[in-house]
Image (spheres, rainbow, N blue to C red):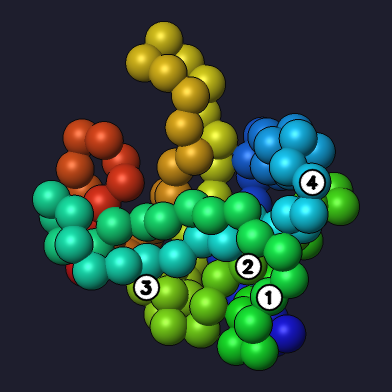
Amino acid sequence: MSETNVTLSDAAARRIGTILAKEPGKDAMRVSVEGGGCSGFSYKFDLVSGGGEDDIVIEKNGVRVLIDSLSLVYMSGSEIDFVDNLLGQSFQIKNPNAVASCGCGTSFSI
């Protein structure tokens, strides 16, 4: 586990905690970056049990988020947030490295 400058908002930590409480055997949320999506890269969110050797662990209020070292390159300086508004509920990544993103907020380009 090494240091990271990716942060987790209070709202995201609360929501992840609520989700994990309903998923027996899962103890963390994995956030990763994949090629594809309408803007070039997309974020993927998975519930997992345990982590990998190259995972960066972000902990807040007893909740763990895992990011693999390759995805971290694209997410440096980002904040993982949870938004609940008239448009719906979703996890959003506020990524200062993204020069463009799509309307759905799940894909971006650098």
Drawn side of residue 95 relative to residue 13, left or right: left
Q: CA distance from mark 4 to mark 2?
A: 18 Å
Drawn side of residue 59 relative to residue 105, left or right: right
The image quarter containing residue 2 is bottom right
- Residue type of the residue flagged with mark 1: Gly
The residue that disc 2 covers is: 66
Mark 2 falls on what kind of element? strand
Mark 4 falls on what kind of element? loop
Drawn side of residue 73 relative to residue 64, left or right: left
Q: Position of residue 81 (x, y in %)?
A: 55, 42
Question: Which numbered circle lies on residue 51?
Answer: 1
Q: CA distance from mark 2 to mark 1?
A: 7 Å
The image quarter containing residue 23 is top right
The residue that disc 4 covers is: 24
- Residue type of the residue flagged with mark 4: Pro
Q: Earlier in the sequence, mark 1 or mark 3?
A: 1
Q: Position of residue 42 (x, y in %)?
A: 29, 57
Question: Which numbered circle lies on residue 74?
Answer: 3
Taking the spot 49% from the left edge, 53% from the top edge, the residue there is: 45
Taking the spot 85% from the left edge, 48% from the top edge, the residue there is: 61
Residue 94's place in the image compared with 4, above or below, is above
Give the position of the N terminus as an image quadrant.
bottom right
